[in-house]
Amino acid sequence: MRTSHHAAGWRRLGPLDGVEKDDIEVTVSGDRLMIEAERKFEEEETKDTFYRHELGYGKFMRTVMLPEEVDFENIHAELKDGILNITLPKIRAAERHTVKVA
């Protein structure tokens, strides 16, 4: 997976060819982002002289540490054209205030 940083936050991109969006789970727990996915396929081919039937299965999990500044409530994940895109927005930095001492 590739991580990029920009002014509004972070983005994680990773290829997940052959994985359906219902087979992906993105979880945030404390300061960890966990990505779990499962790939399943079944192919069947019949011709005059032979029959072929293949089954495939694979599962993976990746955990990454998140910086403290992530806005956990607004994390967004999208699967498009086999690429998982997770957007991790930053929490707006507190504005600086000067307080006069009385």
Image (cartoon, helix red, strand yellow):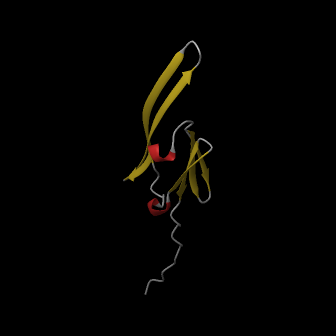
Horizontal and vertical percent position of residue 21 = 50, 46
Where is residue 36 drawn, in percent x and y?
Answer: 43, 41
Which residue is pictured at 47% across the width and 52% down the height?
67
- Looking at the picture, how far across and down is residue 3, in whole percent? 57, 44
Task: Identify the residue shown where x is 49% and y is 22%.
Answer: 53
Judge whether 28 appears above or below 81 on screen.
Answer: below
Foreground: 74 or 100? 74
Q: On the rendered structure, is 65 left or right of 87?
A: left
**Residue 95 screen position, x and y as percent:** 54, 72
The quadrant in which the C terminus is found is: bottom left
Answer with the quarter of the image where residue 73 lies: bottom left
Kindly tell me whether residue 22 is visible in this rendering: yes
Query: In the picture shown, does residue 98 fall above or below 66?
Result: below
Q: Quadrant of the N terminus?
A: top right
Q: Is residue 31 in sight in this rendering? A: no
Which of these two is toward me, 61 or 53?
Answer: 53
Who's the residue at 45% across and 59% down the image? 72
- Residue that protrudes farthest toward the left in the picture: 30
Rendering quarter of residue 83: top right
> In the current view of this chain or complex, which residue is farthest to the bottom?
102
The number of numbered badges drawn on the structure is: 0
